[in-house]
Image (tube, rainbow, N blue to C red):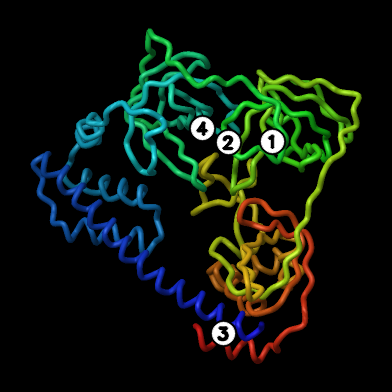
Amino acid sequence: MITFTLLFGYLYLSGCSRMKHKLDDRGNVMIQETSEQIRKRFLELDVDIEPGEIERRLSDLIERFKVPAQEAQRSVVSYFLREHKIKREDYYGAMQGETSSMRISDIDQAEQWVSLHAKVVQLWESTSPAIDQVGLIGDETGTIKFVKWAKANLPALVEGKSYSIENMTTDEWEGRFSVKMNRTTRISELDEEIETPDREAQLVAIDGINESGKWINLRAKVTQLWDSEHESIDQIGLIGDETGTIKFVKWAKSELPELVEGKSYSFENLVTDEFEERFSVKFNKSSSIKEIDDDIEVGYSTTEFTGAMVHIQDGSGLIRRCPICNRALMKGTCMEHGNVDGIHDLRIKAVMDDGIAVQEALFNREITESIGGITVDEAKEMAVDALDHNVVLDEMKKRLLGRYYTITGSILDRYLLVESVQLMGGISDHEIESLLAEVT
């Protein structure tokens, strides 16, 4: 089995190399297409820019400095606007004005300019000064999350009112789409009311929650209360029923009764949310809480998997998290709260193989420190000394790849959330290093 597993690891890494070449090819095509779009728009403004100059700047930002494609495009456009003394509204105004009103269900890609006729279904509490308003907007086809940046200086949206909202950009995170309102967005209130899907909440079991943005009712026990690290959050923790547990957030402005750990409640009008393929529920002003006499028995299910760690995915090692929502930062930016001072953390996103099947697994900080032999403080020192945080990930790969572990935890979609781990007997460090040398 060991030989098969190591062969699988070799094939896996080889496949990753081939996939990288494919991704590079798609990246080059994307850069060329974006460059042509920029050049075409400047030609409409009687400015002829060499395609190679646009491509070079895009390529440097995207491939060399790892700037997100949308931000790289904006940066390149801004550079040439300054060079040729063209106003931003002259460039963007006409181009974005071509966006026609579409339905929410038609939004299927990121970095796209869209306009919507929609109703403000719900406003959430903003936990970042960079965000003016955040919540859900909807039309007859569905709902979608929106973020309105504070710097956009746009009119305030009112819950329950309908608007024509022009020139928003679409975004995507973990398969979920959202829209962003910026300085070029235009908002005007509509006289007619936009119809939205019926949001009447239904009583569900926790293991039946499989979609975000849904209104639900639950009968559950409070199993854990965590310390709230933000003044806008009244309570945060876990609730559970016979089928499992789920994270909850109760906003301070919801003015709801205090929950007590160990007590059971009937919850009505909660809204589901999802992050990194883990669902949660949020309490808001429409929610209600009623203590019940029943002592709800909470179900916990665990899975065990034994296999070799054949790959450690990107996003592992030393990372920074948002101090407000705990999301991992991307280039120092939180998808929810913008630029924040991140908190260091350690994690491993691994691929395990038992010779028959593979299982992706998430290791939290405590377990990562245990099996990797590196604490967060030591990882920070390593990154500072090397001027590169990837040195931590590289060291973890040397220490962990090829070793056999038995891991236990709960399955959440494609990941096993590791709660305990045991190192199994296997091949020697010398054998591991020799095999890794062959495939790297």
Task: Give the secondary structure at mark 1.
Answer: loop
Q: Mark 4 = which residue?
A: 131
Q: Closer to the observer: label 2 or label 3? A: 2
Q: Say above or below: 396 vs 345.
A: below
Q: Closer to the observer: label 4 or label 2? A: 2
Q: Mark 1 = which residue?
A: 230
Question: Which disc, if any, is residue 212?
Answer: 2
Among the two numbered marks 4 and 2 on one chain, the one whose residue lies closer to the N terminus = 4
Q: Which residue sits at x=46%, y=71%?
A: 16
Question: Which disc, if any, is residue 436?
Answer: 3
Report whether residue 3 is seen: yes
Q: Nearer the viewer, residue 45 or 432?
A: 432
Q: Position of residue 220 (x, y in %)?
A: 80, 32
Q: Is 258 on the left-hand or right-hand side of 26?
A: right
Quarter residue 118 falls in:
top left
Q: Nearer the viewer, residue 290 or 390?
A: 290
Task: Give the secondary structure at mark 4.
Answer: strand
Quarter residue 110 falls in:
top left
Distance from label 4 to label 2 (Cα)? 21 Å
Amino acid tagged 2: Ser
Q: Say above or below: 389 vs 138.
A: below
Among the two numbered marks 1 and 4 on one chain, the one whose residue lies closer to the N terminus = 4
Among the two numbered marks 1 and 3 on one chain, the one whose residue lies closer to the N terminus = 1
Badge 4: few (under 14), some or many (20 or more) residues near its Cα, within 10 Å? some
Q: Position of residue 298 (x, y in %)?
A: 84, 41
Q: Quadrant of the N terminus?
A: bottom right
